[in-house]
Each structure stands twice: as structure tokens, then as C-alpha cells.
Image: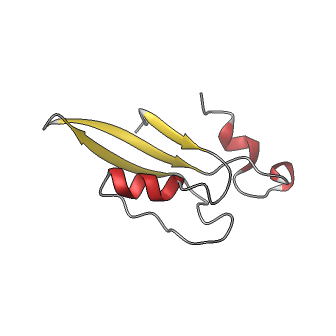
Amino acid sequence: LVADVGFLGVPNAGKSTLLASCSAARPKIANYPFTTIVPNLGVCDINGGAGLVLCDIPGITKGASEGTGLGFAFLRHVR
């Protein structure tokens, strides 16, 4: 499954909260960095039938090259 929209940002920016408010997805939401360690998908219904696939993407942070978060190996696929 490929997302139509990806939310990318720094830790604790509200990406998971935005995904949860726009879709039926229930990602883990907490007040500490690296809560999102895997991408979360949700579908936002538009115009009564069409769906927009949303993705909460863990962001690049300091230390990504040392393995913090998902690092560059995953994020190089984000356009």
C-alpha cells in the first residue's frame, strides 16, 4: 500500500495526533520522542466514497545515522 500523503516532522510535532483525528487509525500517542517507530497508515474518507491514504512517518532526528528512529534507510523512500 502506498500513501497519498505523508506526515513528516520532528518528534512530538503532532503527526500521530493529526493522523488519529483525520482517520480511524489509532497510532500510539505519547509525550516522549520516538513514540512512532514504524509508519502508521489511516484512510480519510472524502466525498462519501473516495479515500485518501495518510501515513504518519517517523522523522529524521539527531542520531539517525547511528540507528536512532528509522534512520535514513527508510526515509530515503519519502518524496
Question: From the image, which quarter does the C terminus lie in?
Answer: top right
| Outermost residue, left side | 48
Name the residue: 46% across, 59% down: 17
Residue 9 in the figure: left or right of residue 41: right
Q: How many marks?
A: 0
Q: What is the basis of the colouring in this image?
A: secondary structure
Q: Residue at x 71, y 57 (%)?
A: 69
Farthest residue, direction front: 13
Which of the two residues, 58 or 38, is positioned nearer the viewer here? 58
Report the residue at 49% width, 68% height from top: 28
Q: Is residue 28 left or right of residue 77?
A: left
Question: In this orientation, which residue lies closer to the viewer: 74 or 8?
Answer: 8
Res 12 → quadrant: bottom right
Would you say 37 lies left or right of 55 here?
A: right
Residue 64 screen position, x and y as percent:
80, 51
Q: Quadrant of the N terminus?
A: top left
The location of residue 19, given as percent across then percent down, is 42, 52
Question: Which residue occupies the extreme top position in the image?
Answer: 79
Quarter of the image for residue 50 reads top left
Closer to the camera in the image, 60 or 14: 14
Q: Which residue shows up at 43% across the image and 37% down it?
A: 3
Figure quadrant of residue 25: bottom left
